[in-house]
Structures are given as C-alpha cells and as structure tokens.
Amino acid sequence: MLGWQKNFQTLLSMLINDLNTGIIVVRQFAIPSQPYRLSFFTDVLSEDENERAGSFVREQNRWQFVFCRGILRFLLGRYSEKNPKDIFFSYSASGKPCLSGKLEASFLKFNLSHTEDYLLIACAKEIEIGVDVEKIRPIPNFLQIMKQYYSKEENSYVLNLSKEEQQEAFFYCWTRKEALLKGLGVGIGEGLKMIQRRSCLERYLKMYTSDSLTGWSIDTLASPASYKIGLAYQGSGLSIENRMESWENYL
C-alpha cells in the first residue's frame, strides 16, 4: 500500500468509532472541486459503478459520483470489516441503497446525500435512517411548492419570518421532509403527497394515521452556514455523533 493510501486509511480509522446501539454516526465531507487521486477511488468501485461514472457527460458530475461512492465504500468497509471492493448494494423501488450479498442481513444501516460540493453519510446499527443536505439557494417558486406540499404549520412557520429568513426556513423544512422520506424508502413524488398535511417541525412523530410513519424522529444537524441538513431515524432519543472532516489534509 502506498504511503498516501495508508494515511487515508488512518484518517478513516479516526473518523469511525465503533457503532453501538443507540448511536448514529454522521460524517460530512467537502467534495474536492477537481478530481484528485482518481484511481484510488475508481479501483474500489464495482464494474457497474465505473460504467455509470463513465456515462456522465460533465467531468464534474463524474468526479462527484466517483468520490461519493468511493468514500461510502471505505466507510462501510470499515464498519463491516470488509474490503471496500467486496461491498455490494441492492436498491428499493425508490432507489434507496442497502447492503446485499453476504452483508444483506447485516446490522449496518446507512444513507447518504450530496450537493455539488458537499457529501453527507450517516450510519447506524439496526436503525433505519435517512439524510438530506441542501445548499441554501434562491428558489423562485418556493411559496408555490410550500402551498402544495407543506403542512399548515410549516407554511405558518415560514411565512411568519422576514423575507430574508424565508428561503433558509424553506430548506429547514424541506431537508427534514426529504430525510424522512429517504428513511422510509419512499420516492419524493409519492412521498410529498403522503406527508403534505403532516408537519415535520416536530422532533418525534406520533400522530400519523399510517403505522409505517409512526415513531420516527427528525432532527436538523449543525452544518456550514450555507447548508441545511435533515436527519430522520426510527425511534427517539438516540445520540448523534456529527462532524465535518477534511480528509484532504491527511494525504
């Protein structure tokens, strides 16, 4: 193993604590703007993943995919004590990934989300989880989106703020909703209609008419000022270990 690869593995060891029941580990990464050590990541991807990476027209999109999948594989490999190349995935109808093959029955649950320059990965033991990260940006028709998909309580919360605060509040609600839907393994189109009358401002959801939606907790995690992060998980009162890591400093 090359020296820089050993340093990377050392960093991952520092990032990961043993997953214990009742703890959710969240790691945040800034995605490098330019491809860096590309072969280090592509070497651990599956043939299908490398083919998918090659299908992207824009080099930046290709690099984002390779980086995110590579980091995910290293983290899951560390938790499962498997070679990152030996990690296999299957997908729900909505596209939610989970472990398959020999790790299909594994205790390890995970979810990830990314923007153009920011990656978020959450892992937990025997707990279904969902995460969403969004960069705060102007959405011209956000009031129309709220009217169609946000609950009465959420609309009231956002509209009672100043115009300068409304855009950030919109993403505060949105990331919580999308994290919940990703945790449930439900697609956005179908899911937003399913929860449009339910406020995601509450931290613990008790009053859903559908049993599949009862007993989920939603939280907003600390993040850089220009981002919002939502986390949803089954149960309540779990500890969340959340921090941003700059892995490039260790190469």
Image: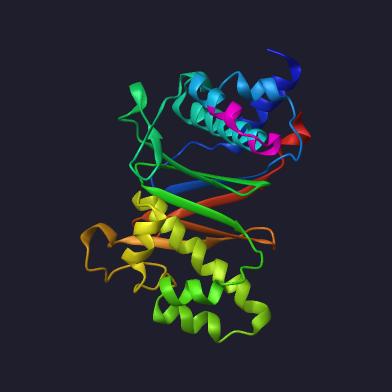
The residue at the point 61 percent across, 68 percent down is 139
Q: Is residue 224 visible?
A: yes
Q: In the figure, is residue 80 to the left or right of 191?
A: right
The residue at the point 55 percent across, 72 percent down is 142
**Of the pair 189 and 205, the residue shown nearer to us:** 189
Where does residue 158 sit, x and y in percent of width and height?
Answer: 54, 80
Q: In the figure, is residue 194 to the left or right of 81?
A: left
**Of the pair 16 and 203, the residue shown nearer to us:** 203
Instruction: Give the quarter of the image for residue 68.
Output: top right
The residue sitting at the bottom extreme is 160
The magenta stretch is 52-61
Where does residue 2 sit, x and y in percent of width and height?
Answer: 72, 14
Q: Is residue 56 magenta?
A: yes
Q: Is residue 236 visible?
A: no
**Of the pair 64 and 139, the residue shown nearer to us:** 139
Q: Does residue 219 lie above or below 32 as drawn?
A: below
Where does residue 29 sit, x and y in percent of width and height?
Answer: 65, 43
**Of the pair 68 and 80, the residue shown nearer to us:** 68
The residue at the point 75 percent across, 31 percent down is 250
